[in-house]
Image: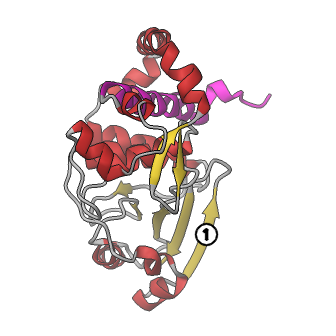
Amino acid sequence: MPLSIYDSEQYLFEIAQSFIRSRVIFTSLELQIFDLFSQSNHGLTCAQVAEQLSLHYVQNESRCLQDLLDCLKSMKLLEHDKEKFTYKLTNFTRNLLLPNRQLLSNIDRDFYDKMPQLNELVLNNSLKDSIHLIMLLRIKQLVDLTAYSNVSIDSFDENVDVMVIWRQEGFLKEKIKQAYDILPSSKASLLILIIPNDEDDEVTLALNILLNMTTTSKEEENPKEFYSTKFFKQIGFQSIERLRSTDGLQLLLAYK
């Protein structure tokens, strides 16, 4: 008899995913982002939102607010004008989300009370560990890691045989080269690079928001070259494969 979704990691990930989406919505409500947009008919840029709400934002350096707005866009709660670089409320947010914010708040409290698995995964761990656990669940939906004994996410441990890099910061080239040097050559060691997708993948965006709240990083000016097979082969990786999930997660697998 096949296992149901409720007996699998997939269900745990769906619980965590619901948590992430709710955190994005309630953080936006608490920061009064929706209220600000409700007063504007022509849309606002990220810089204008930061200025009017006294939120920290420096273009190409501090990503949190930009990621938050992009996350709301991918969740269809904001619309984005690519030519004017402005955001504005969708009809759904204006007509349904804002009038029902108190109802949502009650659901949010019930969610914490009735989901002990989520409490174990997210609330009883540090922010960094929680994010890594959630991301590992996402990766396991695409990659079979049962043959590997030690998986490391964004930390360079000499005993690992799988390295996962998913923070797209200014030291990405150095991190990829460092991962190659650390990974063992005696077996099929693996580097997994998560490729950002700011159009569809609100979960990865939201995870970046949470992690960027606790660390300072600068964006790479042109990171696209680091997602090419040519760059990885120049470093020394022998086999490169690209994978994409139905919900937008994109991975680049590089085997040493």
In the drawing, does residue 164 fall left or right of residue 91?
left
The relative height of residue 2 versus residue 240 in the rendered view (above or below) is above
Which quarter of the figure has residue 32? top left
How many numbered discs, if any?
1
**What scheme was used to colour the molecule?**
secondary structure
**Secondary structure state at the residue bearing disc 1:** strand
The relative height of residue 71 versus residue 18 in the rendered view (above or below) is below
The relative height of residue 22 versus residue 244 in the rendered view (above or below) is above
Which residue is under mark 1? Answer: 242
The residue located at (51%, 15%) in the rendering is 99
The residue located at (22%, 42%) in the rendering is 55
Magenta: main secondary structure: helix
Tell me if residue 9 is in the magenta stretch: yes
Range of residues picked out in magenta: 1-30
The residue located at (19%, 56%) in the rendering is 216
Residue 228 drawn at (x, y percent): 52, 80
Viewer-side residue, 109 vs 37: 37
Which quarter of the figure has residue 177? bottom left
Which quarter of the figure has residue 157? bottom left
In the drawing, does residue 240 fall left or right of residue 177?
right
Residue 181 drawn at (x, y percent): 31, 79
* Amino acid type, label 1: Arg
Residue 159 drawn at (x, y percent): 30, 63
Residue 15 drawn at (x, y percent): 52, 27
Quadrant for the N terminus, please. top right
Viewer-side residue, 41 vs 194: 41
Residue with the most extreme front position:
41
The relative height of residue 220 versus residue 235 in the rendered view (above or below) is above
Tell me if residue 44 is in the magenta stretch: no
Residue with the most extreme right position:
1
> Does the rendering let one see residue 150?
yes
